[in-house]
Image (tube, rainbow, N blue to C red):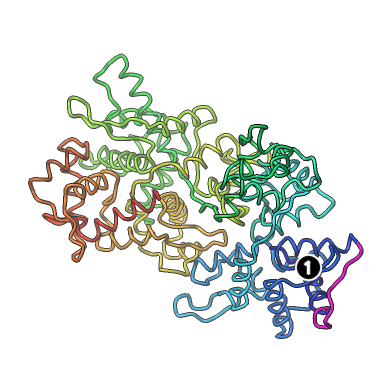
Amino acid sequence: MLIKKEHAVALYAVLGEENKGTHCQISVAAEREPYNELNLANLLEIGSSRVEFRLSYWGRNLIHLLDQMVKEGKLDIPANWKEGYRWIGSEVIAMIEAAMKNGGYVGPAAEEALKERGFAAVVRDEHCGECAKLTEEAEALYEIYLHSHPKLEITKDLANFIVSIPEGPAEKNALDYEGREAELLESMRLLSYSLPDTDIFTLNRLGKAVKEAITHMAYPYDAVISEDYLHVLALYLDKGFDALSDKEKELMETLALIDADGNLLKGGEALEEVLHILREGAYWPAKTFDLEALDVEILKGIDEAMKRHASNPEVLPTPEEIRHYLLDLPLKEYKALKEHYGRRLNQDMGYQKKEELKKKFAEALSVEELFKSFYEKGNHWQQKLMDVIEESLMTLKSFSLVEAKVSEEGKLYYEMTPEGRMVFEEQKEKGTREISAPAVKAITIRESEFGAPNVEWYEAAKAEHLVGGGAPTHSGKLYADLAYNVERKPHITRFELQILHKLPETGQMVPKLYEEFDPTLKEEVTYGLNKLEARGFVELLPDGGIVVTEAGHLIKRALSGTPESFGNALNPLVVRVLEALHEVGNLYVKERKVRILPKNVKEAMKISGLDPETFDKALTVARNARFIGHTSINEAGLDILEAYELLNS
C-alpha cells in the first residue's frame, strides 16, 4: 500500500466526483499513473472504461479516514503536502505492525514518523509512564491494509525493470529509474522500504518469487503475469492438464510455463510459488542465527581433535581436549575471542570490576593468564574456563551445530553435525568472525510481507560479509538457511535469564532495557538480546521494541522459580533427559504432570543415548531447577517440552 501526495489527491478527486453522482474520468495517460497504482492496491476500481475510476470498499474506508483526520486538524490537506510525501508506505505499515505486536507501544525509531502522520500520540500509561502509543486511526489503517488485497499485474516493461534491479537488501540509490516502476511494485506489495526513512529497500518474499518466475518465463505479450494467467495456472494445478481448453494450453506453453506434453517447466514451478504465496499468505517470520567468537574456536578445536584422532584413536574432542586447544591459542592474535572472554568475565564479576578487567585484558597474552588473573585462588581458573567452554558447547548443541556422543569407553565427546561442518568450512574460507543476529535478520526479514531491515541491521550484514552487491552473499544465504532449518533445543545462560526476567508482557524497548542494567553492561545486554532472539525466545522489532515470543513466555514461566544465579539450568542435555522421561512416563492431564515409575528411569537413560554420569548430572540439574519432582515431570518441565515443539514448528 502506497499513499503519496498524488495518491491522496487522486482519492479526493474520485470521492468528489462520486459525491456529485458521477465517475472520475482521467483521459491523459500521464495523469492516470497514481490512479492505476491505487487500482493495483485495490483502493480504486476501473469503471466501464480504462479511464474511469471509482472507489473500492477499502478505498472508500481509507479516504474517509484521511478526510476525518484532515477535518480534525491531525493532518494538513493533501494539496499542501510537499511533493513526494509518503503518508503511507511499506515502512509506515511496518512501523504500525511492530507497535501492534508490542501492545500498541511505539518504538523509538518510529515515534516521530508516526506522530507526524497522525498514527501515534504521547500518552500517560501505567506501565511506561509517558510514552508513544498507536492512535485509533493507525489501527483503522492497519485493518484496511489487512483486508485490501492488491492485484498482481506485471507488464513486459515492469518485468524488465524487476529483472534489472537487485533483490535487496540494498541502499535506495540502487533503484535507478525515471518512471514509476517502484511505485507500482510497492502498490502490489512486492517491494518494501526500511523504517523510518526508506533508506534501504528489498523485494519481499512475493517480490522475489515474481522475479524468479519472470526470469524463466517468455514475454510474448505485454502482460507477463496477470490474474487471468494465475487463474489458468490454478486450474492446471488443481485439475490437471486435461482440464484446460486448447487456448489455455497454448497460453501456458507460449509463456514457457509448461512443455508440449503438459509438464511444468521452471517458469511454471516458479509461478506456482507466486500463486502459493498469494493463496495461502505464505510469508515467513524473520528468524535469525547467532555465532560468537568462542563458538567458532570450539568448532576449530573439535576439528583439530578429530584430525589427531585419525592417528591416535584415544584422542577425542572431549571438553578437556577442547580446553587444551584453547589454552594453546595466542590470545593477542584473537581480538574477537579476547572480547568474548571479557564479556563473560564481566557478566560473572559484575560492573564493579570493569576497569580492572579492562586492564587485565590489555595485558594478558594467553587464556590461562587472563583467567588466572581473577580465579587463581584455589586453582579455580581451570574450572571457570571449563564452565565457559561447556556453556559455549551447550549453545552449539542448542543450534544443532554439534552433537554429544559416547565412546565405547563411555567417554563423552562432541562431533560437528553437517550444519556445524558447513559453518566451520564457511568460517575457514571467508575468515573467522562473529555472525550476529541482526545481520542475519537483515536477510531473513525479506521473507515477511513488508519487512525491510533497518539501517543498523543492514550495516551489520555488510560488515559481516553477509550482504554485498545488493543481495545476500553465499555466506549470507548459508546463515539465513540455518536460521530457518536448524533444530533449536532450548538453552538459556545465566545472564540471558536475567534479561528475560526483566522483559514485561508488552511495551519494552531496547533503550529502556539498557537502563535496567549498569551502563557498563550495555555490550553484554546487546549480545544477550541477540542470542535470545536467535534462540527464538524474543523478537527484536525494527522500531527498537522487544517482544517475548510464545516459546519465550513458556520458558520464562518454567524458569520463574529458578534462581538467576543458577547457570545453564536449561540446556540441551536437560531437554534430552526431559524428552526421554516423558516417553516412558504417563500423562495425568488434570494435574498437568507426567508420572514416572522408578523402574522406568533406566529405560529413559537408554532412550536419551547419554552415558550414566552425564544422564545423572542432567537429571540432578532438572530436579534442582524444579523441572521434575521425585517421580514426575511437573508443569515447568512440560512448559519446556512445549516450547521445544514451538521452536521447531
Vertical comparison of 272 with 512: above or below? above
Q: Nearer the viewer, residue 143 or 337?
A: 143
Q: Nearer the viewer, residue 60 or 140?
A: 60
Residue 584 shown left or right of residue 265 in the figure = left
In this view, which residue lies farthest toward the left? 599
**Quarter holding residue 485:** top left
Q: Count numbered badges in the picture.
A: 1
Residue 389 shown left or right of residue 99 in the figure = left
Residue drawn where x is 55% and y is 46% of the image: 439
Q: Quadrant of the N terminus?
A: bottom right
SS of the residue at dot 1? Answer: helix
In this view, which residue lies farthest toward the bottom? 72
Indicate whether residue 21 is drawn in magenta: yes
Residue drawn where x is 76% and y is 41% of the image: 164
Residue 334 shown left or right of residue 221 in the figure = left
Residue drawn where x is 18% and y is 54% of the image: 624
Amino acid type at circle 1 is: His
Q: Nearer the viewer, residue 567 or 199?
A: 199
Indicate whether residue 620 is drawn in magenta: no
Query: Which residue was labeled with disc 1?
Result: 7
Q: Which residues are magenta?
A: 17-28
Q: Position of residue 492 (x, y in %)?
A: 34, 51
Residue 419 shown left or right of residue 596 in the figure = right
